Image (cartoon, rainbow, N blue to C red):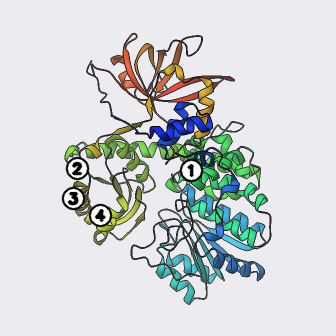
């Protein structure tokens, strides 16, 4: 049978051997551990100490955030005067966790506070004029944006004209000309004049640090504040896929432990619904368990469900909301599968080899799904991609995802004349566009990509830490490797390559037999001289593989716990053999 697998390009990460030797000598690290640290840019004893011991005491001074002092002064005045405060969040996991954090914190400090999170289709992204009008009619005196607002200059100006002050807290890219909303405070570590040492906080990270500044400003316990809100901060940080380094690493490391012990009924119900209640949590528990359920609310129905489960103090309500989010997530998976199939059918009509930026669009596609589909397309073709949902009025909402060598936000900015609105980051962005302009956008952004990306950039690539003898990956080394967690963007799970590993057995698994499970012969690793190695979503290759065949494996080692027993397994990323 013809093999359908085309191996990816394996790129071995370079390393500074002298720095590696220094860490081995000074800290007594295993050579593999030392190399992994150096490959992450952690090449001194001091940097290694900071990375391996991400203490809360090493968080930066939150008053270094731009306008943090101004924001705290205005919030103190609003709390003391009983002014009506309205928090405006966003509809994704970062947006709802940051909105919940602000709301809970302000209420705990005695504020009169209400909160709004937009409906993805009905309200659209970011603060809009209709929201400002409703705030005016409700007697609101202060609006606090979170995970949004940095580009809403007109809305902030109008709010001021109606006697409403605005505090913008955001982490998205400010306007390219450097202009900022005319707000009482604009707290964003990406401001050009920011002196904050770490710019890559999520929206909830900005909220977490600024609320800490406010807590300190009002004379309350910072330790108590952190213990109360690290769980929410960790969820939003992980779901927003910001780099898990520096402060994000500290927030997530301690936030995961706080989440395991959280008293919030909604989070307890959400953990139970996702199958993680009572288990040790890692970043994957959030990115694959809690995050999709929170995001399913806005993708399929009302964002409010996600916010409500984060705010409720009632266990029965929490359980009901968790069941609702479970159902919505199941529907989201069905919708995503359909849109993906239609998008891939469109791409089959393109000469993908000659297309640097992939643009697809369709009617009856949910705007809440297109970002997920764009990620899947980038994963398969290793090219930047924009997926656009066209509504009944002929207007489109699109999500863009990219690869490390292509700044999708800058490329979209260069096409701004074809767009209604746009915003985002170097790796992900959102657009609004008239459907009639989609073809022109596809042409123009592809021209930009053609001038930027090389053939090599567009080959799916796996970054490999090193080649290893698989017997080295014993439990003692795995305990050291656990110090690298939490893994995520900016701090990936290390990949290794082992050559000429013999397949002892290979079978399919999963409800639809969509996965493979190898049993590999590794003499000396354990008493069975074997290791299990699942390869997800490659079940179609089972007839192309046979026992006794030696293969080169690219994999991520992990600890599998089943029925209370722990074993080392290799999560396969790719395989290669001379005959393939």
Q: Which of the two marks, 3 or 4, is nearer to us in this view?
A: 3
Figure quadrant of residue 568 = top right
> Which badge, 1 or 4, comes first in the chain's sequence?
1
> Which badge, 1 or 3, comes first in the chain's sequence?
1
Residue 343 is situated, as x and y percent measured from the top left of the image, at: 32, 47
Element class at badge 2: loop
> Which badge, 1 or 2, comes first in the chain's sequence?
1
Residue 49 is situated, as x and y percent measured from the top left of the image, at: 63, 46
Q: Mark number for residue 238? A: 1
Q: Is residue 278 left or right of residue 235?
A: right
Q: Is residue 46 left or right of residue 36?
A: right
Is the residue 562 above or below the residue 280 in the image?
above
Q: Which residue is labeled 4 in the image?
A: 435
Q: Which residue is labeled 2 in the image?
A: 355
Taking depth in this image into account, of 5 and 202 the one nearest to the observer is: 202
The crowd level at tag 1 (other Cα within 10 Å; few <14, some 14-19, many 20+) is many
Residue 531 is situated, as x and y percent measured from the top left of the image, at: 52, 18
> Which badge, 3 or 4, comes first in the chain's sequence?
4
Q: Which residue is labeled 3 in the image?
A: 447
* Disc 1 and disc 2 in contact, CB within 8 angstroms: no
Q: CA distance from mark 1 to mark 3?
A: 33 Å
Q: CA distance from mark 2 to mark 3?
A: 9 Å
Q: CA distance from mark 1 to mark 4?
A: 33 Å
Element class at badge 3: helix
Q: CA distance from mark 1 to mark 2?
A: 32 Å
Figure quadrant of residue 147 = bottom right
Q: CA distance from mark 2 to mark 4?
A: 21 Å
Dividing the image into 4 quarters, which one contains the N terminus?
top left
Taking depth in this image into account, of 276 and 120 the one nearest to the observer is: 276
């Amino acid at each position: 049978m013809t093999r359908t697998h085309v191996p990816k390009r394996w790129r071995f990460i370079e390393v500074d051997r002298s720095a590696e030797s220094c860490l081995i000598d000074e800290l007594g690290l295993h050579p593999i551990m030392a190399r992994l640290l150096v490959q992450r840019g952690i090449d001194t004893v001091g940097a290694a100490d900071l990375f391996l011991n991400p203490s809360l005491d090493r968080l930066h001074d939150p008053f270094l955030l731009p306008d943090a002092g101004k924001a705290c002064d205005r919030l103190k005045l609003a709390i003391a005067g009983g002014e009506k405060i309205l928090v405006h969040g966003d509809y994704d996991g970062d947006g709802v966790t940051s909105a919940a954090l602000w709301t809970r914190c302000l209420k705990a400090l005695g504020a009169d506070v209400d909160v709004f999170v937009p409906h993805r289709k009905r309200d659209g992204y970011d603060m809009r004029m209709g929201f400002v009008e409703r705030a005016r009619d409700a007697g609101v005196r202060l609006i606090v944006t979170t995970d949004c607002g940095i580009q809403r200059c007109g809305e902030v100006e109008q709010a001021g004209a109606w006697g409403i002050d605005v505090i913008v807290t955001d982490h998205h890219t400010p306007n390219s000309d450097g202009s900022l909303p005319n707000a009482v405070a604009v707290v964003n570590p990406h401001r050009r004049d920011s002196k904050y040492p770490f710019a890559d906080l999520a929206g909830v990270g900005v909220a977490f640090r600024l609320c800490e500044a406010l807590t300190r400003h009002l004379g309350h316990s910072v330790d108590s504040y952190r213990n109360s809100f690290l769980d929410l901060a960790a969820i939003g940080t992980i779901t927003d896929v910001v780099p898990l380094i520096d402060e994000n690493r500290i927030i997530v490391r301690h936030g995961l432990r706080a989440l395991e012990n959280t008293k919030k009924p909604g989070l307890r119900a959400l953990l139970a619904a996702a199958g993680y209640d009572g288990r040790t949590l890692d970043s994957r528990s959030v990115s694959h368990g809690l995050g999709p359920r929170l995001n399913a609310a806005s993708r399929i129905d009302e964002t409010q469900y996600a916010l409500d489960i984060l705010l409720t103090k009632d266990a029965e309500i929490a359980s009901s909301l968790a069941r609702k989010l479970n159902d919505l997530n199941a529907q989201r998976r069905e919708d995503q599968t359909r849109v993906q199939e239609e998008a891939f059918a469109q791409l089959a009509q393109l000469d993908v080899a000659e297309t640097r930026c992939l643009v697809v669009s369709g009617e009856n596609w949910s705007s809440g799904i297109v970002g997920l589909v764009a990620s899947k397309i980038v994963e398969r073709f290793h090219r930047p991609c924009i997926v656009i949902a066209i509504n009944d009025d002929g207007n489109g909402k699109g999500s863009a995802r990219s690869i490390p060598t292509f700044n999708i936000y800058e490329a979209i900015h260069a096409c701004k004349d074809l767009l209604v609105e746009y915003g985002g980051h170097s790796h992900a962005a959102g657009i609004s566009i008239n459907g009639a302009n989609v073809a022109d956008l596809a042409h123009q952004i592809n021209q930009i990509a053609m001038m930027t990306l090389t053939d090599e950039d567009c080959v799916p690539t796996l970054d490999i830490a090193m080649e290893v003898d698989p017997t080295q990956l014993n439990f003692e080394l795995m305990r050291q490797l656990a110090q690298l967690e939490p893994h995520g963007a900016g701090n990936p799970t290390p990949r290794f390559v082992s050559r000429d590993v013999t397949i002892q057995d290979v079978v399919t698994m999963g409800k639809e037999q969509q996965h493979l499970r190898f049993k590999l012969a590794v003499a000396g690793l354990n008493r069975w001289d074997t290791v299990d190695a699942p390869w997800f979503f490659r079940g179609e290759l089972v007839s192309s593989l046979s026992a006794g065949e030696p293969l080169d494996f690219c994999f991520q080692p992990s600890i599998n716990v089943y029925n209370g027993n722990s074993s080392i397994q290799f999560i396969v990323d790719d395989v290669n053999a001379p005959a393939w």
